[in-house]
Amino acid sequence: MSALPYRAALEACAAEPIRIPGAIQPHGALICFDPQTLALRQMSRNAAAMLGVELAPGPLPAGLSGLQAPLRAWLESGDIVFLKVLEVAGRRWQLQGHLTPQGALLEFEPPPQPDEEALESLYPRLSAFMADLSASADLAGVARAAVREIHALTRFNRVLLYSFDETGDGTVLAEANDGVLPSYQGLRFPASDIPEQARALYRLSRIRLIPAVDYTPCPIEPVNSPVDQAPLDLSRAGLRSVSPVHLEYMRNMGTGASMSVSILVNGALWGLISAHNAAPRMVNPQIRNACDILGQVLSMHIETRLQAGLAAERLALSAVEQSLLAELAEASSLQAGLAAHAAALLAMLRAQGAATIIQGKVWMTGQTPDEAAIKAFAADLQAAGEEQFETDSLAQRWPQAAGFGAQASGMLAISTSQVHADYVFWFRPELVRTVEWSGNPVKAAEPVSGRLHPRQSFELWKERVELRSAPWRPAEIETAISFRNAIQTLVLRRAEERAELTDMLERSNRELEAFSYSISHDLRAPFRHIVGFAELLSDRERSLDERSRHYIGTIKEAAVSAGRLVDDLLAFSQLGRSQLHKTRVDMAKLVQEARRLLQSELAGREVAWQIEPLPDGWGDATMLRQVWQNLLQNAIKYTRGREMTRISVGGTAQGGKIRYWVEDNGVGFEMAYAGKLFGVFQRLHRIEEFEGTGIGLALVKRIVERHGGAVEAHGEPGKGARFSFVLPEAGHDKRKTISG
């Protein structure tokens, strides 16, 4: 068979107007009416005879007058669908309606008899089904529970549940069968069995019944809608007539009736429950609605299970990724870091081989293609502009890969550079397996006389699958993308920008000097003005009461504090190059000043302060004030939540050195992490628990070390922490006071 006729037949099949067949199945009747006036626009040819009412386009006939009130109530409610059992023209009907741009559609079907018994039997079944779902250990168990219930509800000969893979092929996960029809358990169905336009309808309309394969379609009259002169869109209509190709498919399968229930996960068609009967079989509307509800419950349950499994998988892979990234950040180069942690690189994506190419240099570990193939892959991916690529059939992209399929039939690649052909590759070996199909998928459909006909045989057909690896799971692909982004931004960017570092530093220094000047000029003056005008106001307005004078004093004090903070910020920005102005420092006074500045953070808290006499220090008072403020602020922050906050401050002089400390009864920390406390942006607690930038203790360390001292930290989880710093006494400072 040539490709051209087959492709043309496929295109013709895809263009088949299955949404607008112009007819319905005859086990019910349909009318289309104006949602404003309720005037009839179109109807199925059998509607008048089935309802026993004369029907014609125009005003709603008297025989249907009983519909006016419930239909207007529905149209005014804003509900998406209309679903009721009502008496119309002297007979009870199951009614289902929905809105379209061409009008409101209303379908009529005889209700089950008696209604009450049907309802009473459905509720316990659905309850038992939900219990079975919760008790199922895996998706296979969930699928078995679903087909058992649908089989019991519909009494069809065979009920299948199959899921679709990324190619559209379906695999039967579970089956309930009374033995009349052959079993398809575990078999695969090719994607061509359900064209894309049919899949779209399955997403739109969750349940579909074909009670008799050899029915005679009942036409819609008139054929075209008076609204848009187009055939009536029956996409959501349960009675919609069936494609002749699908009816032929059913006959070839040996089924006289069928029903399907869509399984939608995250809005996509995840799978189908497909029920088949050898002879024609009707399923009443209430049973179908029960199957629809069952399908929705099943869809939500599968979605929840898949999301939970994906989240757990992501978490496990992310832990490996983060550990590997931490090691790479300390490595001299990406390639050296990956080589030193090859096992982690393989474990991160559950691969059996890996390779990198950086600046033309190849490194490999585990089962991989040869170096020439690695270079060829990299060049091809770069030429195609692909930053990420994955396949479980490498030979499909590169036929030469068939020669090393045993080592690498699957490949996942990520780019590590936006300039060079630098990539990290992961490889998986061939996984030879036998796939059992329901019929030969290669002969799934054949064009005859220009029209696509479904396959004739559904007999077991086995296919040996070679040159394919285990597929890359979504969580693995997401982890690879995350890893790519991380190494591009955190590792490789640093290496690629190293040549520009000197220029950047010079520019930053110039900007810092300009910033310092701007801060000094633009912020200092306003604060001085605030202080000055506050003093003038206090002196001039002699009639002010004590509270007003207190307010003015508070304004003045706040402005002074703000001005001092600006000075401190400027001093910090220039710590590395500014000159230390060392004098004898009243440490007790600095502690009291820091307490006053932090008083607002203690509102509503009970704090027991214990401040011992503090020896005077030797150093830069401005910088040391910042040390005390950060240490006290740290103690206040991490004692939050204690019924009684205890903070002690002390100092002792010994051997030419003075040790100062701040101790609290806060949350404490593990001593194993003590070394990280004084690093820039290092945190031991989540930001949701304790706010902060992570720079305070780093600032303390930098200031103390510039004074020739050292910092220490001791803590115990749940019991508190003690931070101390040591400074040389006056006369024992051997460091020179320098700038830079």
Image: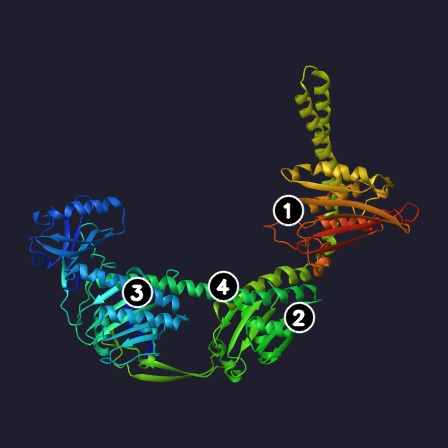
Q: Nearer the viewer, residue 104 or 452?
A: 104
For marks 4 and 2, the one nearer the N-term is 4
Colour mapping used in the image? rainbow
Callout 2 touching callout 1 (CB < 8 Å) = no
Residue 515 image label: none
Q: Nearest the camera: 410 or 638?
A: 638
* Quadrant that contains the N terminus: bottom left
Query: In the figure, residue 324 lies in which quadrant?
Result: bottom right
Assign a secondary structure to mark 3: helix
Q: Which residue is mark 1?
A: 642
Q: Amino acid at mark 4?
A: Ala
Q: Nearer the viewer, mark 2 or mark 1?
A: 1
| Cα distance in 3D space between marks 4 and 3 | 32 Å
Q: Give the mark, 2 or 1, whose residue is nearer the N terminus.
A: 2
* Foreground: disc 4 or disc 2: 4
Q: CA distance from mark 1 to mark 4?
A: 35 Å
Type of amino acid at the residue the image marks with label 2: Gln
Mark 3 / mark 2, whichever is N-terminal: 3
Q: Is there CB contact under 8 Å for labels 1 and 4? A: no
The residue that label 4 is drawn on is 311
Q: Is residue 481 left or right of residue 630?
A: left
Specify the label residue 197 is tagged with. Answer: 3
- Helix, strand or loop under label 2: helix
Q: CA distance from mark 2 to mark 1?
A: 49 Å
Asked if the residue under mark 3 is in contact with the one under mark 4, i.e. CB atoms within 8 Å, the reply is no
- The residue at which mark 2 appears reads as 335
Please, what is the three-letter code of the amino acid marked with disc 3?
A: Gln
